[in-house]
Structures are given as structure tokens and as C-alpha cells.
Image (cartoon, rainbow, N blue to C red):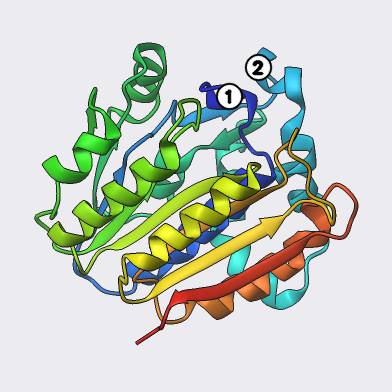
Amino acid sequence: MNYRHAFHAGNAADVMKHAALARVLAYLGKKDAPYRVLDTHAGAGIYDLDGASAQRTLEADGGIEKVLAAPLPPAAAELLAPYLDAVRALRAGGRRLYPGSPALALALSRPQDRFLFCELHKEERAKLEKRVGDDPRVKILAQDGWQALSAHLPPRERRGVVLVDPPFEEPGEFPRMVAGLEAAHLRFATGIFMLWYPIKDLRAVDAFRRDVARLRLPKTLRVELDFATVRTLDALSGSGLIIINPPFTLAEELRTLLNALAPLLSRDGKGRARVSWLTAEG
């Protein structure tokens, strides 16, 4: 996968990940107390789907564009509304833009909430600073996301979500995620952690799930969406999330919305969603 997310912005994996993030933020926003969002691999913030990078792959056509154009079942439409409304609001000026995780989090936030976005890539960070850096609630760091997990947890607000979404360019990302999660959870046991991963190397994904389960962290939810009935090793076959301390409503919400999205986002119209507990809910 190319590090520059502009090639993949708005694709099926983004839709799955951002729909889940929007539900988590909706839950956090129900209480007046502020929360913190820590995004360890923030990217450029906002992406132009008519730009050269996105047009080179056209991945968004099989992702967000399909969802925006589709008649959704009422229950799924209601759950997806905050996410899809944020996308539509960004396009109010006529440009076909897509919000990355930082822009989506800001769109769904309140004045009292705070944000820490980490991005090591110089050009991506410059774009992020230009697009969201003027917001006084935002702090952008040129810091390795894995180091941020130990350096900035727990947050002063004592509640919030940590999104770990590495580019999976380098070997060893799965073991690094497990080690980072274990260390971060010790510092912020009450936080919500969301770890995104591509489903491509099936043996690596299976080993990752087992390693996470061995941590025995309470309330560990596994969420996956297959993009075809037959998985292949030469293409992205699906998208996954490990969610620690999910809101109590999240599992059922994700079953509802992902079952509606699966046939839309799959390459053969037969995608499959899986939502299950790796560690017992209690």
C-alpha cells in the first residue's frame, strides 16, 4: 500500500473505518465532559477525489461514491448519517472532497474537545497543518505515532479515543501494533482504542488477532468487512478493526450498518461483515 493516503482516500476500507469512528465519537459526545482524539498516523486531513492521486486508482468510486448514491435501509442510514453528513458538508463548495480521520473528527466535535494529530511525513504534515492546523483545539506533531502512545497518554481529559492507522508499508506493523496497544492500555485503560488493519496476508491477520486476544484486555471487539467472497493475496481483500472498550451500543450498531454496506462495497456484491468479541465483553 502506498503511504500517501490520497491514492486510497474514500475507498471501501475508509468507509468502514470512518463509519465506525463516527459512531464512537457520537457516543463520546453524549456527555458534556470533553474528550481527546489521538490519531497516530493522521495523514493530510482532507483529500481531493478529483486530484491526480485519487484519479489514478479510482478507489473512491467503489467506496464513498457508491454509499452516497445508494438507497440505504432506514436503520443503517440513521447510523451513518453523522459520517455521511460530514462528507456532504465538506462538498458544499462544489469540490469532491473527502475527510480523513482528522477532518472527520473535527466535523463531529464540540468546542470543548481536543485533538492530537501525529504525522511524520513532511509533505503530508504540511497539508494537514494547512487544512486543520488553524483550529485552536488541534495540536499537530512531527512525531512517530508509536512513540506518541507512550508520550501523550493518558490525556488530561481522561476520556477519548486513540486511532492507530499505520500505512502498512514496513514489515512488522502487526507486532508493533500489539506491543503499542499493550503499553498504551497500561497508561490509559479506560480509553477507546481503534486499530485498523488491511486484510491481505491472511496468515499475518490470523496471527495478529491471536496476539491481541492473548493480551486478555477486557472488551476487545473484532470488526471485519470482506470485499469479496473469495479472498486473494494480491489485492486488499478486506478491512478490519480491533476496538478496545467500545461503547456498549457499538457492536450492534456496526452489525447493522456493515451488513448494509457489505453488498455495496464488495467487488462481487457478496461482501460479508463479521463483528465478534475476541475477549469476553465483561
Q: Position of residue 275 (x, y in %)?
A: 59, 72
Q: Quadrant of the C terminus?
A: bottom left
In the visual, does 72 lie left or right of 139? right
Q: Is residue 86 visible?
A: no
Where is residue 209 drawn, in percent x and y?
49, 59
Residue 232 point in image, percent of width and height? 78, 42
The amino acid at mark 1 is Ala
Query: Which of the labelled discs sits on residue 85, or is there none?
Result: none
Q: Residue 154, how many percent across, how many down?
A: 13, 55
Marks 1 & 2, CB-CB < 8 Å contact: yes
218 vs 157, nearest the viewer: 218
Q: Secondary structure at mark 1?
A: helix
Residue drawn at point x = 44 percent, y = 31 percent? 45
Disc on the earlier residue, 1 or 2: 1
Res. 220 visible in picture: yes
Identify the residue at the far right of this view.
268
- Which residue is drawn at the image coordinates 55% and 46% (left, top)? 204
The answer to whether residue 3 is above or below residue 248 is above
Observer-nearest of 10 and 244? 244
Q: In this picture, is 49 found above or below 117?
A: above
Say above or below: 93 vs 112.
above
Q: Label 1 belongs to which residue?
A: 6
Residue under the image location 49 percent in, 38 percent down:
100
Question: Which image quadrant is residue 274 in?
Answer: bottom right
Name the residue beneath numbered marker 2. Answer: 53
Q: Tag 1: Cα neighbours inside 10 Å, few (<14), some, or many (≥20)?
A: many
